[in-house]
Image (tube, rainbow, N blue to C red):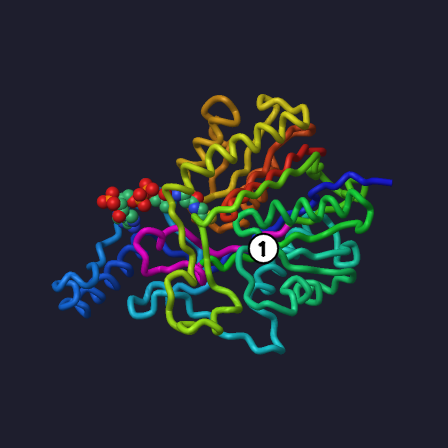
Amino acid sequence: MTYTPAITGTGVFTPETSISNAELVEAFNAYADRFNAENKNQIEAGEIQAKEHSSEDFIFKASGIERRYVMDKSGVLDPEVMHPLLRQRGDDEPGIMSEMAVDAAKKALAQAGKGPDDVDAVICAASNLERAYPAIAIEIQELLGIKGFAFDMNVACSSATFGIQAAADMVRSGSIRSALVVNPEICSAHLEWRDRDCHFIFGDVATAVLIERLEDAKGSHFEIRSTRCETVFSNNIRNNNGFLRRSRPDGMKDRRDMQFMQNGRKVFKEVLPMVSQHIADHIAEEGVENTQLRRLWLHQANKTMNDFIGKKVLGRTPEPGEQPNILQDYANTSSAGSMIAFSKYSDDLGDGDFGLICSFGAGYSVGSVLVQRHD
Ligand code: COA
């Protein structure tokens, strides 16, 4: 016997503090001035490069980002610190990722009208995990009082859609009745805030979806018609931090490659055709025409990129609201971006409407979820 999976609830945890482009640029420029003053002699001798100022205008034009939420604002904006200051949690208290995810998960459960006893599995799918083990997902499972099992997974910006595919396939096969897929993303802690090329890109957030058997849905829900995942290896988005770090001769040094690194131009050029083709193939295999897609909830990395994908997929410029962007307020929140858009902009769809969630990013990876609304 197989079952039809459906998304029955979603939730978003948004941090209390946000940083505007103006605040960000002011802090960065103060840091750059200090760096240049401290390294005046080496800069004059041509041994190191002076740091150039960042600009609000560039950030908005290049990305569409206006502000970003963060778990700690004070450290990021202190020119002497330039990273978030997050208290190390004791082993006997909840981890920071778990806390964020639990908030989002409770909202998803409330929307679905379900409780912990209705959930059989928790998947924590995110770009970075605050520890190797025990799994963050098992801590979330414990905090929510859920029986069954839980595990972590990481496919960078595509973690959420790959997690949804894993959960949907388990529901379909009957091995579980339901799963929570949570995406706590503390991107501020793997962003190099001292690098002008990327210091504006990321923000923090957590999202959650509840996936259940369609027949168990209590209210309106989104049937998961099908999912598709694709990966092709690329070094153009890379983070070398990992457990082998200490075993290297320069192990504990402040190495740039231990944070988010990207060749943004190449990513832009190479990922666009991959995503457009992926979506076209997915809907064609399902027998769904692009004219039937009422909404696209795309990964939120860059507005120009999303505008291009929307136009390519629909064959015309999307109408306002057809392809909602949230990155002006949240920036790139890695795997959570498309899920924030889905959570905030899906209530107005009508019975039978089709929509498509699509993520893309490091790997390279692309994941798509074709959904159909039922009231
Ligand atoms: N303020 C002012 N100028 C800046 C700047 C800043 N913060 N950052 C870069 N610049 C300058 C550069 O030095 C460069 O100057 P030059 O032309 O004199 O060399 C110029 O602006 C253009 O920089 P570039 O990095 O080529 O900009 P871009 O138009 O490619 O935009 C990204 C940069 C990152 C926004 C864009 O490439 C992008 O979004 N790529 C895809 C990213 C992505 O999806 N990543 C996935 C992560 S999950």
Indicate the quadrant where residue 64 lies. Answer: top left
Q: Residue furthest right?
A: 1
Which quadrant of the render holds ligand 1? top left
Horizontally, residue 159 falls left or right of residue 18, namely right
Image quadrant occupied by the N terminus = top right
Q: Identify which residue is drawn at 54% across, 75% down.
A: 89
Residue 334 on image: x %, y % = 50, 50
Q: Amino acid at mark 1?
A: Asn
Residue 159 on image: x %, y % = 58, 50
Residue 194 on image: x %, y % = 32, 60
Q: Give the prevailing secondary structure in the magenta stretch.
A: loop
Indicate the quadrant where residue 140 lies. Answer: bottom right
What is the secondary structure assignment of the residue under circle 1?
Answer: loop
Give the residues drawn in magenta, as a range: 188-208
Q: Identify which residue is drawn at 32% across, 51% down.
A: 197
Q: How many marks?
A: 1
Q: Identify which residue is drawn at 35% across, 60% down.
A: 193
Front position in the image: 139 or 218: 139
Residue 289 on image: x %, y % = 61, 22
Q: Identify which residue is drawn at 22% across, 54% down.
A: 53
Task: Indicate yes or no whether the magenta region holds residue 109.
Answer: no
Task: Indicate yes or no whether the magenta region holds residue 198.
Answer: yes
Horizontally, residue 24 falls left or right of residue 93, namely left
Image quadrant occupied by the C terminus = top right
What residue is disc 1 on?
Answer: 154
Q: Does residue 199 appear anywhere in the picture?
A: yes
- Residue 321's place in the image compared with 166, above or below, is above
- Residue 32's place in the image compared with 353, above or below, is below
